[in-house]
Image: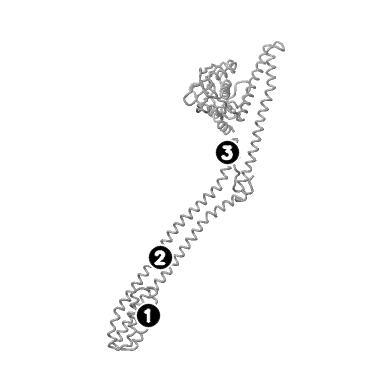
Amino acid sequence: MTSAVSRRWRPRSLLQLVLLAFLMVMLPLAVLMFQAGQALSELSRLADQSAREAVEETRRARTLGALALEMERGARQYAVVEQDSLLDIFDERLAEYRRLLARQRELLPDDPDVKALAGLLDRLAELPGLPMEAFQDRLTDFLPFAEHTEAMRHATNRRIDDRLDVIRTRAETVQHRLWWQTAALVSASLILMLLFTRLIVRPVRQLERRILGIGSGGQQARVSPVQGPAELVSLDERLDWLASRLDELEEQKQQFLRHMSHELKTPLASVREGSSLLADGVAGELTGHQREILDLIDASGSELQQLIEQLLDYNLLQHNQRLETERLDLATVAKEVLAKHRLALQQKGMVLSCFDGPLVWQADRTATGRILDNLISNAIAYGEDGGQLEIRAHARHDRLVLEVANSGEPIPEEDRPRLFEAFYQGRIRRKGALKGSGIGLSVAADCARLQHGSLALVDDARLAVCFRLTLPRPAPGNEHQDTDSAIAEHHARNE
């Protein structure tokens, strides 16, 4: 169960987490859009203001030029016709020029032409009060006056061009700032996206690991509880419940196998003991037909005992038995196993071929004996009467290869993928009075995996069925170490 602290710091639902992630990822983008709008508004305002000022200043400079021309024209006309109304017009144009020049001086405060024009205006203001002869002599002042007016107009245009350059530079600065802000805020959005993706994916992966751990049946340490949306936390709690239920069911299954195997062995021992007493003539001499029936009972009891022993082997493997490896002669092990099946081979009429020893290898005697016993039992049960049984083995530098092959009916292709599953029975039926349990090959494959080896069905050029056991050579110094990793692998594959 999750703690109060973990509940406090996680979203209440997956929908809330997704919505929060969307809002947090969109927040930097919204800030970027806002800042871009602010920058564009600033540039638009600056451009509009500059355009208005440029139009006004250009128009004022042009008006000053026109007034200077009218003033000169009016003064020269007065010098010819001597009308006082022309002097009034001259005074009006002079006053208007002085007013506009004052505003132009605000734009060009340090311009020498503007200062020169101010001095020339004072001289031109003296013209109406001069005698005609002096008036005519002073008309030459209009030439520098026009030159300075034109120079002031050019200075105004340059000032407008400089202001446009400032606006252009400002626009480039804003553009670069927007690029950096875009990169930073988009990066922030990506980081937030990755963060929220991790917040969503992490509990999902924790649940995935929990499910894989439950499915593999391994005894794994309990991982930290899922901290995330309520749906995933609830699913984690359900998985806890499921894992505990599976553990209980597994324990019940193991207990059932143990009790059933041991309970079956007790009456079976009585049956076999009674059949042995009858065979020894304790209850009197038996007829030929009675002895035939007694032999059938004894053979069936032997097969039933073998099935029970296979169940016990399977149960032991499920309980993580440790291996005890030693240097042993595999030829001796094979002959010991064959001795158990000598009567069955004789009844079957099979021709036996077994490799000669010594063939020394580092292995577990019990597990290797179980593999050979199950493979030979299968060969006798499913092989053809009067057929061949070959046991071959050879050691290489890094591995040992042992093969058990027999003649008879080949194993169908559709049965091969599930051949080593526990309790799986293929389409080929066992020859004999009793049906097999379907765990012999599963036990053999588990014994191979516990020794870091493998058991596989391979093709043989001469015989129909061939099983190949491959055992790796143990690393130096690891011959007597526990095989916990092999046991874990056994559980992961067997479940």
Instruction: Report which residue position mark 1 lands on.
Output: 98
Q: Position of residue 444 (x, y in %)?
A: 57, 26
Quadrant containing the C terminus in the rendered view:
top right
Q: Give the label, 1 or 3, closer to the camera.
A: 1
**The label number, if any, that marks residue 212 in the structure image:** 3
Q: Is residue 490 above or below residue 331?
A: below
Residue at the front extreme, as displayed: 477
Say which label, 1 or 3, has the lower sequence index: 1
Q: Is residue 32 above or below residue 356?
A: below
Tags 2 and 1 touching, CB below 8 Å: no
Q: Say whether residue 224 is visible.
A: yes
**Which amino acid lies under the numbered mark 3 shown in the image of this protein?**
Leu
Q: Which residue is painted at 29% across and 78% down in the image?
A: 144
Q: Say whether residue 415 is visible.
A: no
Say which label, 3 or 2, has the lower sequence index: 2
Nearer to the camera, 249 or 433 = 249
Q: Give the label, 3 or 2, closer to the camera.
A: 2
Q: Which residue is painted at 58% across and 35% down in the image?
A: 216
Instruction: Report which residue position mark 2 lands on.
Output: 167
Q: Secondary structure at mark 3?
A: helix
Q: Position of residue 217 (x, y in %)?
A: 60, 35
Distance (Cα) linking label 1 and label 3: 94 Å
**Which amino acid lies under the numbered mark 2 shown in the image of this protein?**
Ile
Q: Secondary structure at mark 1?
A: helix
Q: Secondary structure at mark 2?
A: helix
